[in-house]
């Protein structure tokens, strides 16, 4: 291994209570909200095909035009209690809010940048009421913070000369001040979700990123921060130059999921996902495929089955309301979570051989293993192959406790048949298992 001062400082996952809480939540709501929602992906009658929150970088959008949008930001229909209530109904256990996206507009009245909510017609802090409402609904809040800040005069993508380096130093102080300000104003938040850390000016100062992470932990012990913040002294990101994960969980899964357990290397991880193909902020005209509730549920279940968290993104409108497609998704996902949430919360990798019908999830630290069925076989036979030295002691439908009688088809191998082959939502079966052999044939079920 290479001697590193600013690489990973820990081998393996965090084992403290704050991280165990993050791990138990499994399902989060991402919210991208800012002045880009005013443009909504359009300008002067033209539609921007990129991500709506990036419209300032569009050649058709003059920077000075974009930089005046905040004068129209007045979310008169913003209702944080309603936001929190619909997130709770969806079954989200944590929420990540953009405090400041790459454009630098702060949703809180920051002392360190004038480009903030106090300068808008709305004037008032948006983060405080949001955090309070979500916490009251029993939902933890994490703060998205973009290091890239297109508005700040000292931001440099790279440091080419002494003047750049001086600006870069001032910018690092600005970042540290804003993060300390957010922790001081919002002490109940559980962590930061950093973004915009790919520029050379950031990743070439691994020492600063390391010191910043340690500084934040020192003033708010227990913070959960993913792998996007750090770089090591050789500019390696997410994984240091020895291949060890920096930060508390792998944070690279953006609009994509791992396929198999080997892909996550035993690390905690989280995937963040858009409803349309690639829009985080509000875009008036979603293009391409818009994911259904069942597609989202499969991504959530697949993430949990591979020991990860799944966060679904929403882009509220400039007036503070959510578009109908997003409201309907929250309702439909929530209806399934209400009945089947037991299979998600505290879910972990079960260690069973993957089968075509769907995914296994183990309730952490228990003998309960859930089967979440997405692909009903024409045969009607759901194959279950028990792992070595693991025996089946009970099978029932999660939603109504109706027991199922498995058919033993081989050594510790069964077919399960559902009472009803038809379902337009995923079906969950609860397996009770034991590591003590029940009887000679193995397993506790009589031969069929
Ligand atoms: C190339 C690229 C840069 C930044 C992003 C940002 N990360 C997401 C979480 C959104 O904030 C998006 O604007 C996405 C793609």
Image: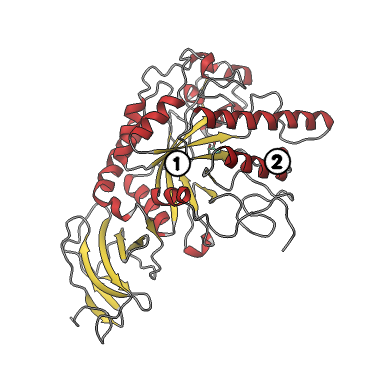
For marks 1 and 2 on the same chain, the one whose residue lies earlier in the sequence: 2
Residue at image point 56% right, 22% down: 110
In the displayed orientation, state which residue is furthest to the bottom: 440
Image-based side of 78 in relation to 336, left or right: right
How many numbered discs, if any? 2
Secondary structure under tag 1 reads loop
Image-based side of 425 in relation to 243, left or right: left
Rendering coords of residue 408 (x, y %): 24, 79
The quarter of the image holding the C terminus is bottom left
Say whether residue 34 is visible.
Answer: yes
Say whether residue 316 is visible.
Answer: no
Residue matched to label 2: 208
Along the line of sight, the residue nearer the viewer: 154 or 328: 154
114, above or below 250, in the image:
above
Rendering coords of residue 194 (x, y %): 57, 39
Q: Is mark 1 within 8 Å of ligand 1?
A: no
260, above or below 445, in the image:
above
Secondary structure under tag 2 reads helix
In the displayed orientation, state which residue is furthest to the right: 162
101, above or below 435, in the image:
above
Q: Which mark is residue 274?
A: 1
Residue at image point 53% right, 40% down: 193
Q: CA distance from mark 1 to mark 2?
A: 31 Å
Badge 2: how crowded within 10 Å, few (<14), some, or many (20+)? some
Split into quadrants, the picture shows ligand 1 in the one at: top right
Colour basis: secondary structure
């Amino acid at each position: 291994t290479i001697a590193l001062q600013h690489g990973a400082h820990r081998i393996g996952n965090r084992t403290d209570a704050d991280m165990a809480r993050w791990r138990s939540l499994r399902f989060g709501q991402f919210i991208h909200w800012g002045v880009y929602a005013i443009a909504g992906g359009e300008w002067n009658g033209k539609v921007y095909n990129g991500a709506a929150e990036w419209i300032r970088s569009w050649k058709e959008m003059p920077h000075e035009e974009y930089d005046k949008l905040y004068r129209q930001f007045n979310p008169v229909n913003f209702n944080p209690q309603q936001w929190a209530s619909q997130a709770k109904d969806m079954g989200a256990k944590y929420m990540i809010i953009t405090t400041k996206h790459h454009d630098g507009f702060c949703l809180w009245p920051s002392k360190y940048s004038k480009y903030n909510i106090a300068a808008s017609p709305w004037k008032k802090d948006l983060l405080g009421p949001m955090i309070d409402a979500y916490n009251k609904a029993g939902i933890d809040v994490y703060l998205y913070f973009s290091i890239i800040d297109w508005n700040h005069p000292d931001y440099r993508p790279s440091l080419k000369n002494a003047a750049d380096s001086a600006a870069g130093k001032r910018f690092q102080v600005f970042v540290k001040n804003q993060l300390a300000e957010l922790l001081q104003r919002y002490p109940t938040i559980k962590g930061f979700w950093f973004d915009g850390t790919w520029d050379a000016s950031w990743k070439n100062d691994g020492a600063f990123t390391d010191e910043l992470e340690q500084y934040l932990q020192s003033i708010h012990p227990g913070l959960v921060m993913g792998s996007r913040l750090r770089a090591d002294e050789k500019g390696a990101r997410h994984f240091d130059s020895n291949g060890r994960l920096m930060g508390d969980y792998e944070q690279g899964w953006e609009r994509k999921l791992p396929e198999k357990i080997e892909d996550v290397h035993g690390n905690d991880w989280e995937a963040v996902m858009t409803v349309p193909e690639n829009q985080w902020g509000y875009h008036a005209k979603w293009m391409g495929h818009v994911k259904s509730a069942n597609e989202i549920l499969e991504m959530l279940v697949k993430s949990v089955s591979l020991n990860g968290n799944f966060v679904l993104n929403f882009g509220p409108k400039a007036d503070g309301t959510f578009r109908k497609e997003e409201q309907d998704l929250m309702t439909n996902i929530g209806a399934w979570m209400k009945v089947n949430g037991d299979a998600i919360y505290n879910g972990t990798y079960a260690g069973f051989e993957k089968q075509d019908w769907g995914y296994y999830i183990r309730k952490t630290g228990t003998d309960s293993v859930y089967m979440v069925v997405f692909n009903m076989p024409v045969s009607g036979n759901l194959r279950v192959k028990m792992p070595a030295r693991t025996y089946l002691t009970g099978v029932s439908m999660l939603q109504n406790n109706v027991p199922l009688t498995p058919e033993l088809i081989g050594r510790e191998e069964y077919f399960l048949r559902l009472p009803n082959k038809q379902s337009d939502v995923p079906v969950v079966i609860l397996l009770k298992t034991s590591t003590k052999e029940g009887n000679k044939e193995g397993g506790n079920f009589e031969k069929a």
